[in-house]
Amino acid sequence: MTDITIKITDRNGQLHEVQAPTDMNLNVMELIRMYELAEEGTVGVCGGMAMCASCQCYVLNDVLQTERNDDEEAMLSEAYHVKENSRLGCQIHLTEDLEGLEIEIAPAQ
């Protein structure tokens, strides 16, 4: 069992350094919900199916090496507050290689 450290800036601008388990097949959206870093009911509205963009976040460093998948691209093309570094948290699965990831939760849709 390996935990990694991820830095998450919430929608109020507060930085949280959290421990994320890599052995439970969790994603960033679930981590945000687990630590209650966003108001209840505002993240993961679709349950992590890449269908709502409520878990949109901005990747702030170069730790994440994967590109957006087709579902993610399609959803972000319709979302608000999208930036070049936008990703859907539900599509970022927690693995050991994400140690040190820094993200900011995008404003609510």
Image (cartoon, helix red, strand yellow):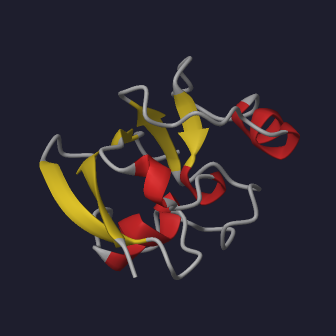
Residue 14 in picture, x, y percent from top left: 12, 47
> Taking 103 as reference, is 81 above or below it?
above
Residue 80 in picture, x, y percent from top left: 58, 31
**Going by the image, does 67 lie left or right of 1?**
right
User: Looking at the image, which residue is at 56% across and 66% down?
Assistant: 44
* Tally of numbered discs: 0
- Residue sticking out furthest to the left: 14
Residue 65 in picture, x, y percent from top left: 58, 33
Query: Where does the N terminus fall, quadrant-wise?
Result: bottom left
User: Looking at the image, which residue is at 59% across and 60% down?
Assistant: 93
Kindly indicate the quadrant of the structure image that contains residue 25.
bottom right
User: Looking at the image, which residue is at 25% across and 68% down?
Assistant: 19
Compare residues 24 and 60 and report the one nearer the observer.
24
Kindly indicate the quadrant of the structure image that contains residue 39.
bottom left
> Taking 60 as reference, is 106 above or below it?
below
Compare residues 55 and 109 and report the one nearer the observer.
55
- Residue sticking out furthest to the top: 84
